[in-house]
Amino acid sequence: MFSFFKKKPPADTTAGAPAAEATPAAPVPERTWREKLGLAAPPAAEAVPPALADEPVPAERRTWLAKLHNGLRKTGSSIAQVFTGTQIDDALYEELEAALLMADAGVKATEFLLDDLKRRVKEARATDPSAVKGLLADAVTELLMPLEKQLVIGEALPTVMMVVGVNGAGKTTSIGKLTRHLAEGGEKVLLAAADTFRAAAREQLAVWAGRTNVEIVSQEGGDPSAVTFDAVVAGKARARDVVIADTAGRLPTQLHLMEELKKIKRTIAKAQEGAPHEVLLVVDGNTGQNALAQVKSFDDALQLTGLIVTKLDGTAKGGVLAAIARERPVPVYFIGVGEKLEDLETFSAREFANALLT
Ligand SMILES: Nc1nc2c(ncn2[C@@H]2O[C@H](COP(=O)(O)OP(=O)(O)O)[C@@H](O)[C@H]2O)c(=O)[nH]1
Ligand SMILES: [Mg+2]
């Protein structure tokens, strides 16, 4: 669960052989949230079972968890405050409702969590508010569980990802961190600097990429679709494992710029059949409900396959993950708690709930 990504063998190396033989892992039920929400084009990806509860936690992960815990303090403390009294009564639930809304969990997730919590309290016959806090952690974990998913690469060569989001969300930084992890895992990565608006974006990528196994395709002031096309073609020709396209930031309301993203996506598909394999949205967790709005808009336009939620260090709006889980459950591959390489990590529902509430 903690490893940054999972490498799978290509699905089609042995022509004619059934794919099931190449990947003997137990079949996992396919996600149906898109259908439930009435959305088209479900991503062809499979869920990964949650980590075993008694898996030992490595030292670096513990350090990171401490950062996450710290980062969510502003969100968590007002929720925890609710459980400092002596009684479980209507006032407690009302305070909790207010605290969840303040944390930007949104009306739907808040209602859901309150109902679920009341059921759990009844079932457990809890009489002590501090026990209710533990039950809330369970409810939050279960709500967030559908967001847990590991990034898989290697099923296609190259695995092509495009990364989108508003300005300043943390796209370039996150790509840099992800690239470093991939390169350190022995993967050959090619980056497409398709943020052709900002000259600095290329240098920024180059700094992160400045190591073996990583190359950058860029073109000053060029057309982002053309740069991406060239990068995917080069990635194929040079047998790279992963191609990641960084795109310029934009608001979902800038319709012509959203069209440009759709064009980049179509161009990638022309360069390589079945690509892009991942369309990742980077959202700033600090923006709360605004982040949820971005998830919905970018998903409607591009059929996202995953999210990276950054800046969960010091946010009072960490409840937004609950809102995303309830209203548009696009899997969360990584969450970020700072600007350094080690600050980006895989998302775990249980860890997040514990960091928030304990
Ligand atoms: N505190 C904090 N800052 C972050 C995080 N991720 C990115 N940043 C910072 O956010 C700023 C914008 O990041 P950048 O990657 O350039 O955003 P982009 O416009 O989406 O490409 C930079 O100063 C990053 O260092 C995070 O998880 N926490
Ligand atoms: Mg950028």
Image (spheres, rainbow, N blue to C red):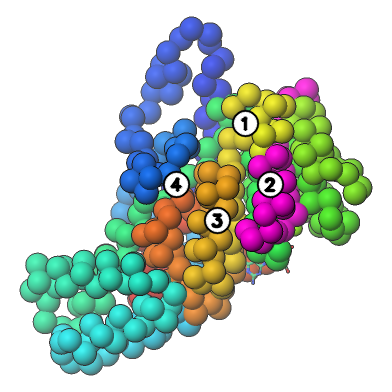
| Relative side of 325 to 162, left or right | left
Q: The residue under label 2 is which amino acid type? A: Glu
N-terminal of the two: label 2 or label 1?
A: 2
Nearer the viewer's eye, disc 4 or disc 3? 3
Q: Which residue is mark 4?
A: 149
Q: Is residue 238 magenta?
A: yes
Name the secondary structure under disc 1: loop
Marks 2 and 4, how far apart in space?
28 Å
| Relative side of 281 to 340, left or right | left
The reply to whether the C-beta atoms of the residues labelled 3 and 2 are less than 8 Å apart is no
Residue reaching furthest to the top: 16
Q: Quadrant of ligand 1?
A: bottom right
Q: Which residue is mark 2?
A: 259
Query: Does 232 appear above or below 86?
Result: above
Disc number for residue 275: 1
Image quarter where the C terminus lies is bottom left
Residue reaching furthest to the front: 255
